[in-house]
Amino acid sequence: MSELSKQVQDVLKLYPDLSAKDTNNGYLISGRFILNSEFSEIPLYDEYFIEMNVSLKFPTVIPTVREVSGNIPEDFEHIYENKELCLGVSCDLYDFLACRPSIIDFLNGPVTSFFYTASYFKRYKTVPYGERSHGIEGIIEAYLERYQLSDIMQLITLLAYVAGIYKYRGHILCPCNSGKKFRNCHGQIVLQDLTSSRNERFKKDAIDIIGYYFNKKGER
């Protein structure tokens, strides 16, 4: 039994209302997903019906999830046009899976967090914790947090290395003006993204952010 198959079987043991079947690209896990979670002393219970596609390339590829019972409010905006749930910014999800490459952890983490937010929104017409902006602005916010920066221009300079515009050189001073060598500062996360199995995704994000920034700057 492969590691992925074992993970799927572990999911079915922990979530007996779910079932799984093989697909050409991995597994389709579907069925009733029971939310029984609490945040800031506000417990919520709800029921959803999900379809989660798990790629054979998991955890390199993020699982996609849909809710098929219609239990999510229509005015809850965190759903893509193709009906997949917006579980978070891709770099946040990649970082989560890099640390916790488990389908169960993915269900208990981003998926549960999404449904808790949806159920909270149904009840209170607001969200329980801070949320990122939509679209590219939200991606920029995620990368500023990920790189622990507040200066957008410093972020753009660092992402130019990820995008391949600049060549990585560990001995130069870090663009964040810390006075440290690049390799001892933000160069560590840049090199991590350059050598990651998800490098193409990080590169695309970098190119999109850089393009958006300079297009927006040109409009001023």
Image (spheres, rainbow, N blue to C red):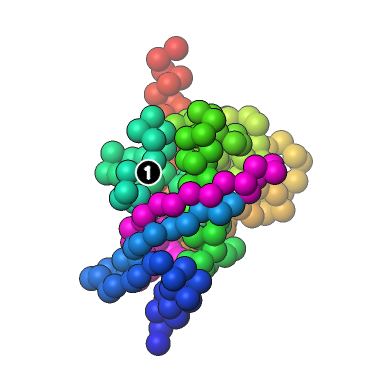
Q: Where does the image place residue 61, in percent across and percent down from the top left?
A: 40, 61
The amino acid marked with disc number 1 is Asn
When the figure is inspected, residue 199 is found, relative to residue 11, above or below; the finding is above
Q: Where does the image place residue 137, in percent across and percent down from the top left?
A: 47, 30
When the figure is inspected, residue 11 is found, relative to residue 92, above or below; the finding is below
Query: Magenta span has 40?
Result: yes
| 58 and 67: which is toward the camera | 67
Query: Magenta span has 143?
Result: no
Q: Where does the image place residue 124, in percent across and percent down from the top left?
A: 54, 30
Q: Which residue in the protein does label 1 denote? A: 71
Instruction: State left or right for residue 158 relative to residue 54.
Output: right
Residue, far top: 220
| 130 and 49: which is toward the camera | 49
Give the main secondary structure, helix, strand or loop, of the magenta stretch. strand
Q: Secondary structure at mark 1?
A: loop
Tell me which residue sits at (41%, 33%) in the image.
76
